[in-house]
Amino acid sequence: MLKWGRDGSFDGAFFFPRGVAVDFVGNIFVADESNNRVQKFDARGSFLAKWGREGAGPGQFKSPWGIACDALGNVYVVDTGNHRIQKFDGNGTFLCAWGNRGRTEGQLNYPYGIAVDKEGAVYVVDSGNSRILKYMPTDEELNRGKEEASASQAPSETPPPGSVAVKAGDTEAFLSWMEVPGAQSYNLYFNTVPNLTIQSATKLEGVPNPYVHTGLSNDTPYYYAVTAVFETGAESGLSSEVTATPVLIDITAPQNPYAVINHGAFMANTPEVIVTISANDIDTGVGAYLISEAPMTPVAGTPGWVDVTPITKFGATVPFILSPGDGQKSIYVWFKDVGGNVSTPAAATILINTSGYLCVAQWGRTGRGASLLHGGEFMAPIYGLSIDQQGSLFVVDNGNNRIQKFDNAGNFIILWGNFGSANANFHNPTGIACDGKGDVWVVDTNNHRVQKFDGKLGGYLMKFGSRGNGEGQFNSPRGIAVDRVRGYIYVADSANFRVQKFDMNGEFIMSWGSFGSGDGQFYFPRGVAVDQTDGFVYVVDMGNHRIQKFDTSTNVLPQVLAKWGGSVEAGHASSPLAQEAGQLRSPWGIAVDGAGDVYVTDTGNHRVEKFDKEGNFITQWGGFGNGKGQFNFPYGVAVDARGSVFVVDSGNTRVEQFMPADEGGERLQEDAETVAEIEQPQGTSKT
């Protein structure tokens, strides 16, 4: 068994990995969808390389999904959001691309899966067109990198393999080739001098494809060619000649130094962090490590080294206390082997933010029941969250296809819903909102509808919507908001890339939006919120990593009043910019308080950010983890009348309550005093 990877955008981490492929050497390639990149690892899971960023140019991606390798080690990536296939060599060098959006022959509409056969034919799942497409390599592709003479050879009834790939190892060489139609077996010819002939080379009969040639001498070049043998017994001529020089893998200092703080979190609310570190040393083994905030390289005798039992592949997660004060912190980690050879440093950074909001309460646990004493049981994911005017909380327990109601302190009150499509049943519910009468509106995503319930007992009242793209129809709706003052309902119709507006009877009024990144366009909108004071509407444009604010009062095309987050530059989601204060990475939930300030769950960065009504950044809190005040994929967010912020912490199957630091500190002190009084022995008094 072997496993690696965590959530994040650092090397070796993933944000919704989708496809995986293995080349003939054993290297592993992963399509890292939301980081818009491909990562390459060796057979042990050690990070080797990465390429790609968000965009539409060569070597750029928009939600890459499927991935495959051909017999020569080339990598094919399904660039789903750009409706195309891209081909790279095994080091990530762009070779070619094909496809665009459409329904005609050769075009693609949201492709996903991909496979390559041994003759180089590429098969693609063209999901949006409900079909499979097969592409054959052109002569130009088959002859890529060859000399003109070999590319112009006349056709033969017994052709040799058209392409052969070789990679050197330690006293071995890895070979693979494109198979020849009709061939029954293959012979391998090799020598230590170039210009092979069948007469001069050593012959190995009936070798498999791929083949590992072992027992070689390091630092000696070997030359190879392959022939195909047919059913008649005829043997083809030699393929193009390839060469490889095996080398001794003998590295003095530890290699592949690696470090990450708090599993790649951007921010933490305490200087007490954990650091995950690793390195390899195949000679004597990793024997010690040193962590410091000073970038000066230590020597073997520098104080501070932590000795470990020597091991070839070392890894550990250790506590570390950063220097006092808020701000960006950097650490450096060195490793040394038993002989005292010191590695190059691994570096990691994190933002320490101890100000702003404090977590004063949390409740919830994994399960399918409900606790009448305190808190409910949830099955991840849990998405939406809403608060009625009396302060009761309603949580969308998506994993259990139900709604749970709590009082403001997290005490469980009631639940309703089951899996299904009948009235009052749900299939992947997500968004939720409360109106001025206390009724609850739930977005039933996979049933493509909105249902209304009595907020007191959960009784079913009505529904509207069906699957489609017409007025009042939905395609995977997600967010919902109610304008309690003016009597409107807004629904984020996610897969139709629009927002729809209804009256309180569910009658369609208007819609706006289309697929894109321009003003008023969306890429999978998620949360939606209304400022009850002025009626302005805020929409979480998740795929564009931004918030858009609209004036919808005229019931015609809404005016964009403000927008923030995102970037005009490609590759935003996987860039350091997405982690900066005020920026966003796959945001989800949104809420507006009585003063008009806006709260956003910045899901990809595991934090909550607060903005004023114009989008100016105010503060942030959270960070990845399962400790108090930390998050693991926060989704829904809501603010009560007193200014408390409630957040659905989906990955930790809980709800957390936050208050501004001053009020929160008083609350925590009061709670501590109450606990002390309860635990005080009878017959004693406080002094």
Image (spheres, rainbow, N blue to C red):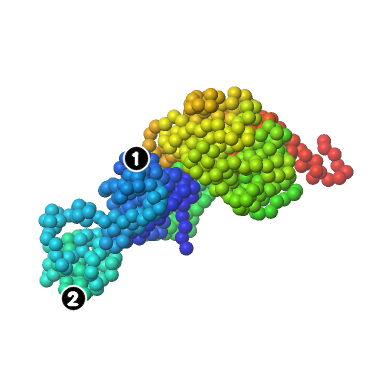
At x 23%, y 66%, the residue is 181
Q: Amino acid at mark 1?
A: Ala
Asked whether, in this view, residue 3 is left or right of residue 149, the answer is: right
- Res 56 label: 1
- Residue 136 image offset from top left, x and y in percent: 26, 56
At x 41%, y 49%, the residue is 128
At mark 2, the secondary structure is: loop
Which of the pair 512/221 is nearer the observer? Answer: 512
Please tell me how crowded label 2 is: few (under 14), some (14-19), or many (20+) other residues with Cα within 10 Å. Answer: few
In this orientation, does residue 686 appear?
yes
Q: Earlier in the sequence, mark 1 or mark 2?
A: 1
Please tell me how crowded label 1 is: few (under 14), some (14-19), or many (20+) other residues with Cα within 10 Å. Answer: some
At mark 1, the secondary structure is: loop
- Residue 686 image offset from top left, x and y in percent: 82, 37
Asked whether, in this view, residue 122 is left or right of residue 8, the answer is: left
- Residue 636 image offset from top left, x and y in percent: 59, 40
